[in-house]
Amino acid sequence: MEKPIKILIADDHNLIRDGLINTISKRMAAVTFGEASSAAEVLKEIFHQKWDLLILDINMPGRDGLDVLKELKTLQPELPVIILSMYPEDQYAVRTLRIGASAYLTKETSSKELIKAIQTVLAGQKYITASITRILTEEIIGKSANPTHETLSNREFQVFKLIASGKNISGIALELSLSVKTISVYRANILEKLALKNNAEITNYAFRNNLTD
């Protein structure tokens, strides 16, 4: 009897998880699923049993997907992870691949491409879409200068996005479970690296560079 493939789906929306399970079940045989709706649940599932694949959203209650991915790649580097996100590829794809993701897909991805990505990753390979290939190629051969926001660390970029969405320092500190002082340091780093003066300019920068949600 064929051993079932175990896929853990981590997303804080029930409908997304149900939709993924339904889509994958229709196109792949011998698959069993686990579900997680928060970063804490993801780590709990990973520690308590072995999985063949993790499909992970970036926006998760508690710690975000980038933090979870980074920790997982330290603790279980062999576990393949597909990031499935609402964010366009030019915002997070390169960052997640650098951390160790096996693929980055947006939630607009077709069912056919999702299955192709899953099969490729389960075979031990990276799955890189055509548009991500273009982004990586431009970065390597230097046809286009890297945007300034690429100099931000993953945490700085996370804080940058939250400021751009209109959240204040206290709200961000609460959401990320960090101190106000720490968030203020990240904000100062962001302003310095991007040569900006205040939150309004951060928001304008995000809008000009298509970094708003």
Image (cartoon, rainbow, N blue to C red):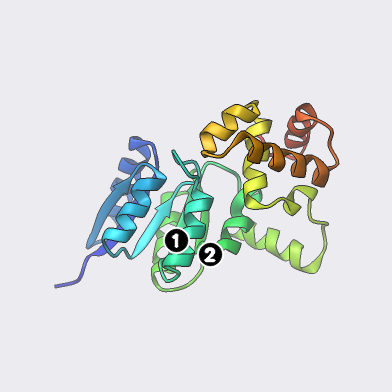
In the picture, measured across the screen, residue 189 lies left or right of residue 159, that is right
| Secondary structure under the numbered disc 2 in the rendered image | loop
Asked whether 86 or 167 is in front, the reply is 167
Q: In the rendered view, tell whether residue 17 sits above or below residue 118.
A: above
Total count of labels: 2
Above-or-below relation of 205 to 122: above
Q: Is residue 1 left or right of residue 153?
A: left
Residue at point 76%, 40% (across, down): 188
Residue 196 at x, y = what percent?
84, 37
Residue ID at (80%, 49%)? 148
Label 2 with label 1: CB-CB less than 8 Å: yes
Q: Nearer the viewer, residue 57 or 186?
A: 186
The image quadrant that residue 161 belongs to is: top right
The quarter in which the N terminus is drawn is bottom left
Residue 207 image-quadrant placement: top right
Q: Position of residue 98 (x, y in %)?
A: 60, 63
| Amino acid beneath label 2 | Gly
> Is residue 213 among what the camera can see?
no
Q: Secondary structure at mark 1?
A: helix
The crowd level at tag 1 (other Cα within 10 Å; few <14, some 14-19, many 20+) is many
Seen at 18% across and 72% down, the residue is 2
Q: Say what amino acid the circle numbered 1 marks.
A: Leu
User: Which x, y percent locates residue 70?
Assistant: 52, 59
Residue at mark 2: 100
CA gap, disc 2 and disc 1: 9 Å
Name the quadrant of the C terminus. Answer: top right
Residue 135 lies left or right of residue 116; in this view the side is: right
**Where does the image place residue 32, in percent across and percent down from the top left?**
23, 57
Labels 2 and 1: the sequence-earlier one: 1
Return the residue at label 1.
Answer: 72
| Location of residue 34 with respect to 18 vertically, above or below | below
